[in-house]
Amino acid sequence: MAGILFIISAPSGSGKSTLVNALRSQVGGIDFSISWTTRQPRGSEQTGREYHFTTREEFERMRDAGEFLEYAEVFGNYYGTARRSLDEATAAGRDLLLDIDVQGARQVREKVTDAVTIFVMPPNPKVLRTRLRNRSRAEGHVDETVLHRRLNEASKEIENYQQYRYILVNDVLERAVAQLEAIVVVERMRRDGKPLDIRTKRDFEIAESCREVNSRVRLQPVLESFGIFPDHHPQQYSLLEAKDDDGTDRKSAD
Ligand code: ADP
Ligand code: 5GP
């Protein structure tokens, strides 16, 4: 039976890696594609575990040799998914999860039209700012330029949310993990043509609540907090003005 290709995208710091790690520890049978990148490892990251870290020259060689299913330049670095990841998962009939940005997701959707796409949003800019900063601190290095760049990119990425089948708001972690699990369960049942039973009926309701069409009221305050008004252009809003969760203006505090 063919595996399912899951694509998950989110602005940096939304908690995507945290969600994916939780999913992987609780749901079996899903492979995770380790991307190639030219960015430097952060904190305890190791090549071959979080990413295959490589040089620009090597990345460009692989790109020119057609080795990538998709690739994109994000925050000044290349990121790409090796074609081999999908080929291997397909050959083994296993599900595969890609953690890629909105540009990469667009490229893959054109090639794999039945890919299941999931977009993760942070609840608001203040929470995003706090998460990015806390993560940098935990990794022992707060780079203000990188932090500001990632914050400023967030609303541009969120503008693409309607291109995804499911939308999660990663506010309460346990709830977001349960939603992600429900999406995987329901999509597998759909592929297998299995009927709903008592447990999967609940999963179905949870997954359906994450469909874009069913999320509009829930998403409105989140989108507005990022200066996004559906069917309108985003208003000028500087995320750099946002304060941290505790109300401190960390920009001046650091
Ligand atoms: P991403 O992979 O989207 O860049 P991470 O998974 O690295 O983001 O999460 C960024 C930071 O936010 C991490 O320090 C993580 O522990 C924290 N985090 C993630 N999800 C939540 C959540 N629901 N509530 C509080 N903190 C969270
Ligand atoms: P980070 O540097 O925080 O790990 O990732 C930055 C961004 O690059 C995130 O949005 C992440 O999803 C994206 N990304 C990671 N791997 C890939 C990839 O293989 N392809 C693309 N297009 N984006 C990726």
Image (spheres, rainbow, N blue to C red):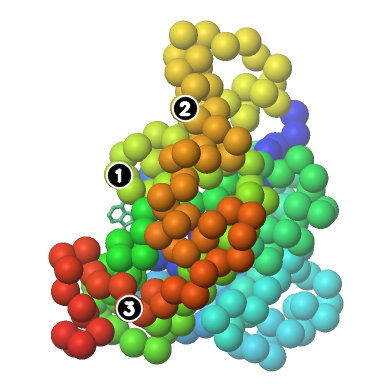
Look at label 2 and name its amino acid: Ile
Quarter location, residue 135: bottom left
Q: Identify the secondary structure beneath mark 1.
A: loop
Disc 3 target residue? 241
Q: Is the CB atom of the residue marked by disc 1 within 8 angstroms of ligand 1's nearest atom?
A: yes
- Report the quarter where the N terminus lies: top right
The circle on residue 172 is: 1
**Residue 218 location in percent, x, y?**
44, 40
Residue 8 is left or right of residue 120, and the answer is: right
Question: In this figure, which residue is indicated by the disc labeled 2?
Answer: 206
Nearer the observer, 87 or 150:
150
The percent coordinates of residue 163 (x first, y second) are 67, 51
Give the SS element for disc 2: helix
Q: Position of residue 241 (x, y in %)?
A: 32, 78
Of marks 1 and 3, the one in the foreground: 3
C-alpha gap between disc 1 and disc 3:
24 Å
Residue 44 against residue 98 in the figure, above or below: below
At label 1, the amino acid type is: Val
Kind of residue at badge 3: Glu
Query: How far is disc 3 from disc 2 in space, using C-alphas?
Result: 35 Å
**Quadrant location of residue 250?**
bottom left
